[in-house]
């Protein structure tokens, strides 16, 4: 009998609160050992871990590489696998390998299988792919069922073909199918964070609004606390609400901190859009139980009128090389915008001669507008600025050649008031040019209307 089947049987005999341990919101970056053991001592009914996000940018989705090292990822997987099997409770992991594409899921599954062999663990493993067929997406584009998000351009079929890895975010339904199929451990590709934690409560008949709200908060572990952190968090869910408690004594889940985290990654303070419905937080209430715990209630769930999934895709732009430099010359800093534009023109003439420009060259001046394009310059100007030059070209050699030429001519570029014929720049390292590898950009960040989820997110089972 699977861990889930035992829970279903137990709850059929006696209705009680469900204890959910959010072990990590960033699996692969370390799990604080003391607070994790404190959480296990509380007898959780399930352990959940989020493993990915688009916060890390498009490179990992596009390249298929894990965002964390194999050693660190295996360490964290071993910790949660051993704990879940010791307690005989379900372990649910979403967005495998950081970006949740086929190569990320495969690499994560290989680590799970290796741990099972090495540690003598036996369980039923479910894996859920999140990759979308380009043909399916192109058919949806032709049918007018794909809609751009957050200012993205409308998606066309050519852009779909340019995508290196294309995934959809699965929701509760896919995790529920895996658990109901008898899986003790679920490893999913790209997924909504809520699906990891809300599927088991849904199976056990808890109110969906409360389950989804709980899932929205605990997927980031103790980030909802004061001070925020990555220690595991315990949620105790009943039919009227749920209690939150960090497993680190120094962290406090307060009504204000928990309510604030309910807005995490949300543009709307009242509605959280999910593939199969909407979490409505208008009537949500947050009440302190004591200095460290908060009780949450009131959220409701509304089924969607149309099913949708968010799609994410990344395509190769070229190869990137960087130039790392800085300046403390007030004359350079005051004129840096014109100087950098002038050097761009000099470099283009040197490396292209009479041919068309076959690369892109950018500069960011940290200390002025490096992080954000502010409407007004700092007054007074900073004492120092850091200059980041970035070239993207078709080949690594071409990117390196452009960056090296840029370094040389920016170093010696003449400008009004210059005191020396050289030394415009200071280099933090040598060589100051750095090959940064393939460069990717998000080219798919769109919503697709679908008729169902099961065919898009198939569940595969294996016995380990």
Image (spheres, rainbow, N blue to C red):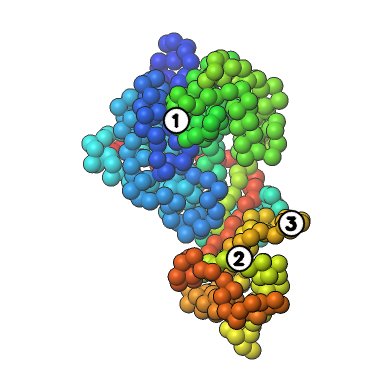
- Neighbours of disc 3 within 10 Å: few (<14), some (14-19), many (20+): few
For marks 3 and 1, give the one nearer the viewer: 3
Q: Position of residue 64 (x, y in %)?
A: 45, 56
Residue furthest to the right in view is 375
Picture layout, residue 364 above or below residue 454? below
Residue at which label 2 appears: 328
Query: Would you say residue 164 is visible in this rendering?
Result: yes
Residue shown at 52%/41% (left/top)?
191
Pointer 3 residue: 379
Q: Relative to the observer, which residue lies in front, 131 or 80? A: 80
Tell which circle, 3 or 1, labels the residue nearer the N-terminal end: 1
**Does label 1 or label 2 sit earlier along the sequence?**
1
Give the structural element (helix, strand or loop) at label 1.
loop
Left/right placement of residue 31 relative to residue 438 reads left
Check the image and name the residue furthest to the top.
14
Choose the circle earlier in sequence order: 2 or 3: 2
* Residue at the image point whose x is 50% and y is 31% from the top: 222
Q: Quarter of the image for the N terminus: give it.
A: top left
Residue 232's tag is 1
Label 1 neighbour load within 10 Å: few <14, some 14-19, many 20+: many
Q: Which numbered disc, 1 or 2, marks the residue closer to the eye?
A: 2
Q: CA separation, marks 2 and 3?
A: 16 Å
């Amino acid at each position: 009998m699977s861990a889930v089947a035992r829970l279903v049987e137990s709850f059929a005999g006696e209705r009680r609160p469900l204890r959910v341990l959010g072990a990590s919101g960033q699996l692969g970056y370390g799990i604080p050992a003391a607070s994790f053991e404190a959480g296990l001592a509380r007898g959780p009914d399930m352990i959940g871990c989020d493993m990915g996000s688009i916060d890390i940018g498009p490179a990992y989705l596009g390249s298929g590489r894990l965002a964390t090292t194999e050693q660190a990822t295996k360490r964290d997987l071993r910790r949660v696998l051993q704990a879940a099997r010791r307690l005989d409770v379900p372990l649910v992991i979403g967005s495998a390998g950081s970006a949740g594409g086929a190569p990320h899921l495969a690499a994560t599954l290989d680590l799970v299988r290796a741990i099972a062999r090495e540690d003598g663990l036996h369980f039923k493993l479910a894996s859920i792919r999140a990759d979308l067929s380009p043909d399916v997406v192109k058919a949806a584009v032709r049918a007018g069922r794909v809609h751009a998000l957050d200012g993205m351009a409308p998606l066309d079929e050519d852009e779909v073909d340019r995508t290196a890895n294309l995934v959809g975010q699965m929701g509760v339904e896919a995790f529920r199918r895996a658990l109901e199929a008898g899986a003790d451990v679920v490893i999913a590709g790209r997924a909504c964070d809520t699906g990891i934690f809300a599927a088991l409560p849904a199976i056990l008949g808890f109110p969906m609004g409360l389950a989804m709200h709980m899932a929205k908060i605990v997927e980031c572990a103790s980030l909802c606390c004061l001070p925020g952190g990555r220690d595991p968090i315990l949620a105790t869910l009943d039919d009227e609400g749920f209690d939150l408690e960090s497993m680190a004594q120094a962290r406090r889940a307060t009504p204000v901190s928990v309510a604030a985290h309910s807005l995490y990654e949300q543009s709307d303070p009242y509605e959280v859009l999910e593939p199969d419905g909407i979490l409505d937080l208008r009537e949500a209430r947050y009440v302190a139980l004591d200095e460290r715990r908060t009780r949450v209630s009131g959220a409701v769930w509304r089924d969607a009128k149309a099913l949708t999934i968010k799609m994410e895709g990344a395509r190769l732009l070229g190869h990137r090389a960087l130039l790392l430099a800085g300046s403390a010359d007030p004359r350079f800093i005051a004129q840096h915008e014109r100087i950098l534009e002038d050097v761009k023109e000099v470099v283009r003439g040197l490396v292209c001669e009479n041919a068309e420009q076959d690369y892109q060259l950018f500069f960011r001046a940290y200390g002025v507008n490096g992080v954000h394009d502010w409407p007004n310059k700092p007054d007074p100007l900073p004492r120092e600025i850091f200059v980041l030059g970035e070239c993207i070209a078709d080949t690594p050699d071409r990117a390196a050649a452009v960056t090296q030429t840029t370094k040389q001519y920016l170093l010696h570029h003449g400008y009004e008031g210059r005191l020396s014929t050289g030394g415009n720049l200071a280099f933090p390292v040598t060589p100051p040019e750095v090959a940064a590898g393939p460069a990717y950009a998000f080219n798919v960040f769109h919503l697709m209307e679908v008729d169902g989820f099961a065919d898009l997110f198939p569940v595969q089972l294996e016995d380990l």
